[in-house]
């Protein structure tokens, strides 16, 4: 019962923060709400016994991508105003409404199998063993690539 309550609280927090991301005019605050949304989604993963996905959500999305966006916003001039042009507001609203209708239709017409038993074994240890023993080189190449992207972004936005 406690997991169900926590799931719904985290779901409401994630949907509310996602709405704040879209509706706020201040880009920095929207980025902070994006990090909150990522953390709430990680909490939803914890309530669903998906421990590896929760760890990845915190490390990669809330940690790396959230901080990268916040640094990008802080290094950009005049970012506090948001987008001054509202030309695409109506087409974006129509596209979002159609996408929402499609998602609701799919969710209501799909048979969702449910399991009453949580997984018997944790998934984090075997995946971490594969990631850090068998796939060390691709993991390190990806980290160097991300570092190069961050350095490139800083070089592009710095004042000359």
Image (cartoon, helix red, strand yellow):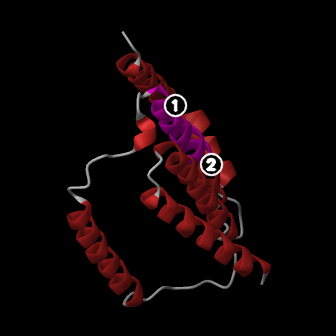
> x, y percentage for residue 65?
50, 40
Q: Give the Cα distance between marks 2 and 1.
A: 18 Å
Helix, strand or loop for disc 2: helix
| Residue drawn at 50 percent across, 28 percent down | 143
> Foreground residue, 93 or 87?
87
Question: How busy is the neighbourhood of tag 2: few (under 14 within 10 Å), some, or many (20 plus)?
Answer: many
Instruction: Confirm whether the magenta stretch covers residue 70.
Output: yes
| Residue drawn at 52 percent across, 31 percent down | 71
> Foreground residue, 137 or 78?
78
Quarter of the image with the C terminus is: top left
Using residue 49 as the reference point, say whether residue 1 is left or right of it: right
Compared to residue 125, the image places residue 73 above or below, namely: above
Q: Is the magenta region chiefly helix, strand or loop?
A: helix
Give the magenta part as a residue range. Answer: 58-75
Give the label, 2 or 1, closer to the camera.
1
Compared to residue 152, the image places residue 112 above or below, namely: below
> x, y percentage for residue 8?
65, 77
Question: How busy is the neighbourhood of tag 1: few (under 14 within 10 Å), some, or many (20 plus)?
Answer: some
Residue on which the image places disc 2: 58
Residue 71, labelled with which disc?
1
Quarter of the image with the N terminus is: bottom right
> Foreground residue, 131 or 24?
24
> Foreground residue, 137 or 143?
143
> x, y percentage for residue 79?
42, 36
> x, y percentage for residue 31?
51, 46
Helix, strand or loop for disc 1: helix
Compared to residue 30, the image places residue 79 above or below, namely: above
């Amino acid at each position: 019962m406690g997991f169900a309550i926590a799931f719904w609280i985290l779901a409401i927090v994630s949907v509310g923060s996602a709405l704040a991301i879209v509706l706020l005019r201040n880009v920095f605050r929207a980025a902070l709400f994006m990090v909150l949304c990522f953390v709430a989604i990680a909490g939803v993963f914890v309530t669903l016994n998906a421990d590896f996905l929760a760890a990845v959500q915190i490390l990669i999305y809330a940690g790396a991508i959230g901080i990268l966006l916040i640094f990008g916003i802080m290094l950009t001039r005049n970012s506090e105003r948001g987008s001054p042009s509202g030309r695409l507001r109506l087409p974006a609203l129509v596209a979002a409404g159609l996408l929402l209708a499609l998602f609701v239709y799919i969710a209501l017409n799909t048979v969702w199998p449910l399991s009453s038993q949580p997984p018997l074994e944790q998934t984090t240890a075997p995946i971490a063993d594969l990631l850090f023993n068998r796939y060390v080189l691709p993991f390190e190449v990806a980290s160097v690539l991300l570092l190069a992207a961050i350095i490139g972004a800083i070089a592009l936005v710095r004042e000359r």
